[in-house]
Image (cartoon, grey):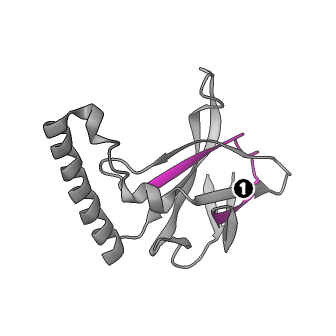
Amino acid sequence: MISVISAPGDLVVARSLGIDVRFGGVEVTSAVSGSPTSMKAEPGLLVRLEGVRNQETKRRDESFLEALHQWVEMRKKHGAENAGDVPIMPGVLALEPIGTIISDDSGTEYRCVSGQIAGNGTEWSASWTFLPVPPQHARLRLQFTIDGEPTGMDCQIAIG
């Protein structure tokens, strides 16, 4: 069982490009690969973040959809090789700089092994996967960063 001991009241842990980023939860997961070349799955820790929808996210979504439409038209008229790269989803730009430093009362060293940002239906969501799995009954501290600089916000989590 996972319990939140402390967190910001509104769960906002960062602000990126005019968008508040909220702590979306943490879970122990069983299907984590420690490296892109490893087929072995092991237990790990999944940290979720959510961009708070507001006028800025709406504006960025609209700009992205227009750029995507223009890109599709360019591909139709001039071919895939001349259209350039597909536009980057705005959630990627806002959420990619957000990091999490995890520590616990046992001195475990956690490393981020994978991440997922945005996608159809998850435009303003991100998740980071860490290894190893926390020890039973650990107390975790999740410290949030933007471009490696602490935001001053953290969450305390109990595992067990």
Disc 1 target residue: 102
**Can you name the residue that lies furthest to the right here?**
107
27 on left or right of 52: right
Q: Does residue 137 show up magenta in the picture?
A: yes
Q: Where does the image place residue 3, in percent across and percent down from the top left?
A: 62, 61
Against 53, is 142 above or below?
above
Against 111, is 55 above or below?
below
Q: Where does the image place residue 6, in percent across and percent down from the top left?
A: 65, 72
50 on left or right of 135: left
Residue in the picture at 31% in, 77% down: 55
Write down the quadrant of residue 158 in the picture.
Answer: bottom right
Residue in the picture at 85% in, 52% down: 106
Part of the protein shown in magenta: 124-146
Residue in the picture at 71% in, 57% down: 101
Q: Main secondary structure of the magenta part?
A: strand
Q: Where does the image place residue 44, in percent across and percent down from the top left?
A: 64, 40
